[in-house]
Amino acid sequence: MKIVDVRATGLRGATPEGGWQEELTQDDVVHTLVAVHTEDGRVGIGSVFTSERLVRGALEVLSPLLIGANALEPERTSERLHRATFWLGRGGSVTHTISGVDTALWDLLGKATGQPVGRLLGGRYRDRVRPYASLLMDRPEPLRDQLLGLREAGWRAFKIGWGPFGRHDSGLDERIVAAAREAVGPEAELMVDAGASDSAWRQGYKWALRTARMLDDYGVAWFEEPLPPDALEDYAQLRRLAPVAISGGEVLTRRQAFQPWIEAGALDIVQPDVTKAGGISELRRIGWAAHDHGIKLVPHGWNTAVGLAADLQLASALPDTDLVEYVTGSPYVDGLTARPWRLDEDGMLSIPEEPGLGIELDPDKLDRYADAGHLLATV
């Protein structure tokens, strides 16, 4: 089964805030869907955390390597793409675009074999997984109201991130966390993301250690991105002394970038993003390398319904991945699929058993944010 076309279309019109200093508008395109078409009319779907223009530029380089290739060999094909484009630099828009292509190829392999991707990755450790509601921080009162609404809707795990945390004073930081814990209750999982990859971040190691101790008082499960993303030695020291788990890695790409962090013991939890770290093939390798060092992989998932579907399949195939991130209130997650996501009575998400990623994009819904016809129409 040969590849005959690769297409891309950006999502625009409902882009959620990112919490960044240079904040996004609803029409900014930071998520782009990729479709790989085959000679027999099958279509595999992937997602890329990069603007449409950069993805299209990367596909001009990648397409000659893809057209005519076997569509049923995702890992070999993706590795070939990485090696053939090494001179363009690892980790930029080309690597991000390969992430979407790789996920689309796994989707195709599952559809061709009639199996969910998780089973093709080696087997399913679980049939459902707990999603955590991921939202930007706010002042204590509005944040409390948001979290109360999510709790009423059935969520049992929550992550609050970015916003004013670490950007004003320690008193406000603690009031935010106290309000969040009060809202979600003592039994819920609560995580805190400082967002230190932000260009405006000014805090350092001593702040991170003091804050980790405060978070422990409120039963916070992990402290995410408490330090700038290149501070490897500080992360390793923080992990040794902090009373809460330390997580990070959303800005890293490919397994080679994660290897020194894993070997240095710098993180309790690694958080690659399937839409930019290299796709399903790379996350599987990162997940097993982490597992061998006693580290858990919980994917960064501030992206799309396609990224979430890939994360669910990975959660079924990796023994330690017992949580997935779910960005709440984003139409790019909630408003693209034919069948909506539903929490069960335990606040869990079922992992699709249908072939491939196990989801179907609804063309009418997709057309609100992208050119569905260009992406999905068969050759």
Image (cartoon, rainbow, N blue to C red):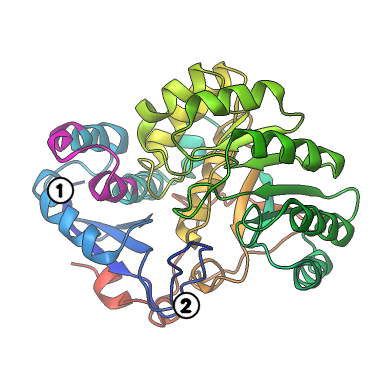
Identify the residue at horizontal 17%, vertical 47% (top origin).
2
Examine the image and state in which quarter residue 50 appears: bottom left
Q: Is residue 64 above or below residue 240?
A: below
Structural distance between the alpha carbons of marks 2 and 1:
29 Å
Along the line of sight, the residue nearer the viewer: 243 or 90: 243
Residue type at mark 2: give it: Ala
Q: Residues within 10 Å of mark 1 (few under 14, many from 20)?
A: many
Q: Position of residue 264 (x, y in %)?
A: 51, 17
Image mark for residue 14 = 2
Is 60 left or right of 247, judged from the image as shown?
left
Is 253 left or right of 223, judged from the image as shown?
left
Query: Which quadrant, please, contains the C terminus?
Result: bottom left
Identify the residue at horizontal 75%, vertical 40% (top origin).
221
Q: Is residue 306 above or below residue 262?
A: below
Q: Position of residue 69 (x, y in %)?
A: 15, 42
Name the residue that disc number 1 marks: 62
Q: Position of residue 25 (x, y in %)?
A: 43, 76
Q: Provide the residue span drawn in magenta.
A: 83-99
Identify the residue at horizontal 31%, vertical 48% (top origin).
96
Please tell me whether residue 36 belongs to the stretch shown in magenta.
no
Q: Is residue 147 above or below residue 294?
A: below
Examine the image and state in which quarter residue 347 appears: bottom right
Along the line of sight, the residue nearer the viewer: 365 or 274: 274
Q: Residues within 10 Å of mark 2 (few under 14, many from 20)?
A: some
Is 120 left or right of 68, judged from the image as shown?
right
